[in-house]
Amino acid sequence: MAGRFIEVEGLGKQYEAAAPGTPPALQGVTLAIGQGEFVAVMGPSGSGKSTFMNIVGLLDTPTAGAYRLNGKDVAGLSTDELAHVRNRVFGFVFQGFNLLKRISAAENVALPMVYSGTGGAERRRRAQELLAKVGLGAYGDALPARLSGGQQQRVAIARALANHPQLILADEPTGNLDTQTSNEIMDFLTSLNRETGVTILLVTHENDIAQYARRLIRFKDGRVVHDGPVTREPQPAAREKVAP
Ligand code: ADP
């Protein structure tokens, strides 16, 4: 199986802070995700979705099992290599956008390129290019507070794309957005996945949003209870609210 993009085997997580007798937050999770996949992660609150995402995103470490990225066990990576992967290989998109409030949209998008050592002129050029790509070419100088929620999430997506990531990790990216704006964001992520082949791993609790993915992984009590292709409802009913 060498060469699979993401492979986890027998992955487990027992938080130290958990009360005695608490079952592990994750147990026995074994799966692989190939380059270019678009995967939705679902499951009830407390089922282990965030724990799984944090481990895959190298923001936390498992207490059991193995995680190989591009065939390499991440347990063997140095602190510098971990930082490199988080900054260059992954792009993160969060429910709350997590933009810095005192700097412009363009400066927010450019931030990951500061950490990756890209020169100032190239940073500004690429930030502008990315903002145009997400439909915000005219908003480079705007502070986040001047933008709508959907626009802020677009800035966050542009920021996630700054260093040409192989994987976008999106944790409830539409959780704070209305239905139409959510669909616009999901349409954008879908075409990004199709056109650039970037792998997308998306946590959502909404079926309508999971419908955009091609594969669904469902967690319950820290285990994977379902893993298979997304079965699409007949179009276009899937995205329309039908009046009773
Ligand atoms: P989900 O994202 O599906 O809501 P989580 O991964 O956040 O689930 O949580 C899985 C389980 O781990 C829950 O029982 C939760 O209470 C527990 N948990 C999550 N984070 C921590 C932590 N930092 N310390 C102790 N327990 C945690």
Image (cartoon, rainbow, N blue to C red):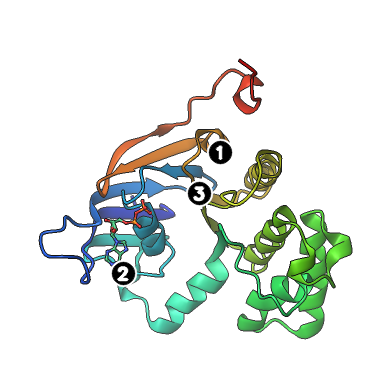
Is the shortest distance between ligand 1 and the CB of mark 2 under 8 Å? Answer: no
Q: Secondary structure at mark 2?
A: loop
Tell me the CA gap for discs 1 and 3: 9 Å
Label 3 is placed on what type of residue? Leu
Whichever of labels 2 and 3 marks the residue nearer the N terminus, that label is: 2
Label 1 is placed on what type of residue? Ile
Q: Are marks 2 and 3 in contact (CB under 8 Å)?
A: no
Give the foreground label among 1 and 3: 1
- Can you identify the residue that label 3 sits on? 202
Q: Is residue 62 left or right of residue 124?
A: left
Label 2 is placed on what type of residue? Thr
Q: Is residue 193 left or right of residue 6?
A: right
Q: Secondary structure at mark 3?
A: strand
Is the shortest distance between ligand 1 and the CB of mark 1 under 8 Å? Answer: no
Residue at left offset 16%, top offset 55%: 23
Q: Quadrant of ligand 1?
A: bottom left
